[in-house]
Image (cartoon, rainbow, N blue to C red):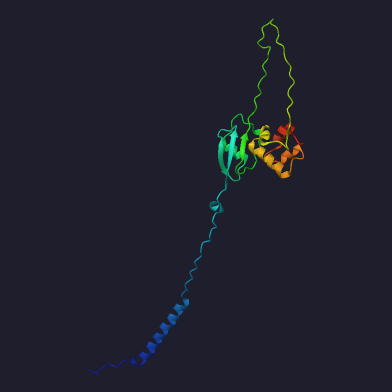
Amino acid sequence: MPSIPDPLKPYRLYVAMFLLNIAVVIGVIYLLRREEPRPVVITQPPTRPATTTANKTTKQISVTLSGAVKETGTLVLPGDARLADALQKAGVKPEADLSKLNLTLALKDGDKIVVPSHTASVPTANPLANATPGSPQPTKTLTAPAATAKINLNTATLEQLDSLPGIGPALAQRILDYRNEKGGFKSVEELKEVRGIGDTLYSDIKDLVVVE
């Protein structure tokens, strides 16, 4: 049976090339319109500096309290503690006389603090109170008060200074250290330069000491 001639056979090659060109154009357009991938940027979180407070070792000091406090003995306090902090931790008795203390005094390791008490005045007994009416009155002997010798700041011992009101062993030692450092006191008012002696304490002891 004779084959039927294909009228498009001479054009098949052209049609194939045409379709190939279309495919190439479509591929190029696709590649051009394709969004290029964005680069991945890895950002390291900022390094937070280590807290200095956490790594810092707080210096501590030991001080000894005695006198009109509820808890006497050695206390461990922060290095920047003041006298008020020590009294708050130890507790103060009702009879404590804080007016003679410098509560803002910065403490140092080894300090010894003596908290003074209010001195209770003892009433003088009246010798006539129990006298029987009509009985002879007892003879009253008048004795002149003994003169109290003032303490010489340039020759006083630790015990003599400790006997002054509001001056404990620690403060007495500071007075001696100041005297040795300065080569002696030039005036009583120089006591104010000793650490721990404020205006109130100075006014209490200025008439009991002398510089010679």
Farthest-out residue, bottom: 2
Q: Quadrant of the N terminus?
A: bottom left
Q: Choose between 156 and 86: the one closer to the eye.
A: 156
Instruction: Give the residue at x 75% y 38%.
Output: 189
Please tell me which residue is depicted at 56% across the width and 36% down the height of the picture.
73
Q: How many marks?
A: 0
Can residue 74 be seen by looking at this rendering? yes
**Which quadrant holds the C terminus?**
top right
Who is closer to the viewer here, 178 or 155? 155
Q: Position of residue 25 (x, y in %)?
A: 44, 82
Q: Position of residue 21 (x, y in %)?
A: 42, 85
Q: Is residue 41 above or below residue 212?
A: below
Say whether residue 102 is visible: no
Residue depicted at 43% across the width and 80% down the height: 27
Residue occupying the point 62% across, 39% down: 83
Q: Quadrant of residue 162?
A: top right
> Where residue 202 sits in the image (x, y, percent)?
71, 35
Indicate the position of residue 50 as horizontal and vertical percent values.
54, 56
Indicate left or right for 15 with 77 as reference: left
